[in-house]
Amino acid sequence: MRADARDNRMRILSAAEDVFGRSPAASTDEVAKLAEVGIATVFRHFPTKVALLEAVLTQRLERLRDRALELADSDDAGLAFFGFFSQVVAESASKLAIAEALSASGTVAGDEAKAAGQGMREAFGSLLDRAQQAGAVRRDAAFPEVYALLVGASRGATATGLESDARDRMLALLYDGLRTGTS
């Protein structure tokens, strides 16, 4: 891919994340306008709105996976785990809006988005394992329950429109339940 085409693709993805993150009903015309490209350029890279939504969702999940992997090398495993958990919840509104737009199109996530989601879950699991080994998270808190808490907190914060202060208090309560008595 030529450098200018690669730049256009990145601008389109960035604009689409912003536009669809604010409104699942947004149009590709709005994406083109924000990306400062023509609509034909958008469709040259992404032949359908669904293809664009899948690419945006995949990029979001890959970025979260990469962040979790980066945090896995942290000296403070507890801080890394809780920091990542907080980041996912804080960014959930726009991710859920993108997933909602994809779902509204009658499409389920494609293979790339599914693989990115699986990679993010595995990286989150590694953060949880490290935090448990460090004594920051209870060992009886298994991955399925903790992941359900992450999803529930994300959806709950988004559905109720929690302001950041209320979201942080909610997470503090949740974290109190996950922490060991010594952390």
Image: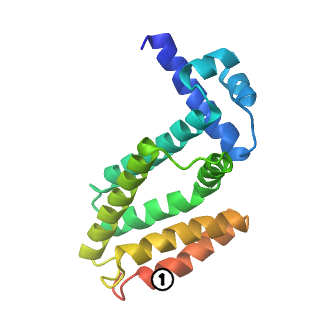
Which quadrant of the rendered structure holds the N terminus?
top left
The answer to whether residue 123 is left or right of residue 86 is left
- Tell me if residue 71 comes above or below residue 158 in the rendering: above
Residue 181 in sight: yes
| Crowd class of label 1 (few under 14; some 14 to 19; many from 20; radius 10 Å) | few
- Tell me if residue 24 comes above or below residue 181 in the rendering: above
Residue 15's image quarter? top right
Q: For numbered disc 1, what is the local secondary structure?
A: helix
The answer to whether residue 180 is left or right of residue 167 is left
Please give the name of the residue rendered at 28% of the width and 78% of the height, measured from the top-left corner: 135
Residue 11, horizontal then vertical, whole percent: 58, 25
Please give the name of the residue rendered at 40% of the width and 81% of the height, measured from the top-left corner: 179
- Tell me if residue 33 comes above or below residue 102 in the rendering: above
| Residue type, numbered disc 1 | Asp
Identify the residue under disc 1: 176
The answer to whether residue 159 is left or right of residue 4 is right
Which quadrant of the rendered structure holds the C terminus?
bottom left
Residue 30, horizontal then vertical, whole percent: 74, 29
